[in-house]
């Protein structure tokens, strides 16, 4: 991810196969990651905060809208309306898809990790755990577990994916990285 220097919100493929950037392409102003991710790839810190530069004096949020961020716990009821939107590699390059509502979550191997049943593939990593109705991000999808351990929640539903949640223990750092008071 560190080679990327731009972000194109809402990017998609046209019927002719052309990549369309309906809101333009925005340059990064800064990228910040947790030290333990940069040094050891510690999955519980697998998230980044990216700030974009204004373009022609306009901020990206003024064009596409703003989302809030909020801390949750790994058993929070706030997660019940979460979806994951990204660019999965089982679709045409540049095609954006949404998982649909994710209905099952369970505690992960760390207090900031959860397992979930959202419909994702390996290239969905970095996609937000987003409650569209409340316009709130609660975490980041970080891993699709295709071959390793399979987790089960209390209803014996198979959970194969992992996400890092915005938790009280990492929320202050994320706000600081973002420049939010």
Image (cartoon, rainbow, N blue to C red):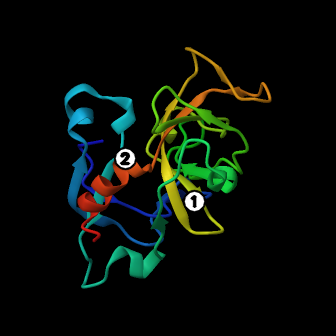
- Disc 1 or disc 2, which is closer to the eye? 2
Residue 116 x, y percent position in the rendering: 63, 36
- Disc 1 crowd rating (10 Å Cα; few below 14, some 14-19, many 20+) is few
Q: Is residue 45 left or right of residue 138?
A: left
Q: Nearer the viewer, residue 135 or 92?
A: 135
Q: Which residue is mark 1?
A: 14
Where residue 110 is drawn, which disc sits there? none
Residue at image position (50%, 63%) is 10
Most distant residue in the bottom direction: 57
Whether residues under marks 1 and 2 lie with C-beta atoms below 8 angstroms apart, the answer is: no
Above or below residue 14? Residue 135 is: below
Q: Is residue 126 above or below residue 53?
A: above
Residue name at image x 53 percent, y 46 percent: 73
Quarter of the image where one finds residue 91? top right
Quarter of the image with the N terminus in it? top left
Choose top left, top right, bottom left or bottom right for residue 174.
bottom left
**Quadrant of res 156:** top right
Q: Secondary structure at mark 1?
A: loop
Residue 142 image position (x, y, % from top left): 46, 37
Report crowding for label 2: few under 14, some 14 to 19, many 20 or more residues within 10 A (C-alpha): few
Locate residue 161, reporting x and y percent: 58, 31
Left or right for 178, reference 130: left
Q: Whole-Å distance between the Cαs marked 1 and 2?
A: 42 Å
Count the labels in the image.
2
Using the image, determine if residue 62 lies above or below residue 146.
below
Find residue 169 and name its label.
2
Expressed as whole percent of the image width and height from the top left, the position of residue 50 reads 29, 57
> Looking at the image, is mark 1 or mark 2 earlier in the sequence?
1
């Amino acid at each position: 991810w560190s080679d990327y220097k731009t972000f194109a919100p809402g990017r998609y493929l046209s019927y002719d196969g052309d990549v369309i950037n309906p809101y333009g392409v925005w340059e990064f102003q800064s990228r910040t990651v947790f030290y333990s991710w940069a040094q050891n790839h510690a999955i519980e810190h697998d998230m980044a905060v990216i700030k974009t530069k204004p373009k022609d004096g306009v901020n990206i949020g003024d064009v596409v809208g703003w989302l809030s961020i909020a801390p949750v716990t790994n058993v929070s009821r706030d997660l019940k309306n979460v979806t994951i939107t990204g660019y999965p590699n089982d679709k045409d390059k540049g095609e954006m898809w949404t998982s649909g509502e994710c209905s099952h979550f369970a505690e992960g191997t760390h207090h900031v990790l959860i397992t979930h049943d959202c419909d994702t593939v390996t290239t969905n990593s970095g996609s937000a755990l987003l409650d569209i109705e409340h316009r709130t991000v609660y975490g980041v999808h970080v891993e699709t577990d295709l071959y390793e351990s399979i987790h089960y929640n209390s209803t014996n539903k198979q959970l194969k994916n992992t996400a890092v949640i915005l938790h009280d223990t990492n929320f202050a750092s994320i706000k600081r990285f973002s420049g939010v008071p």
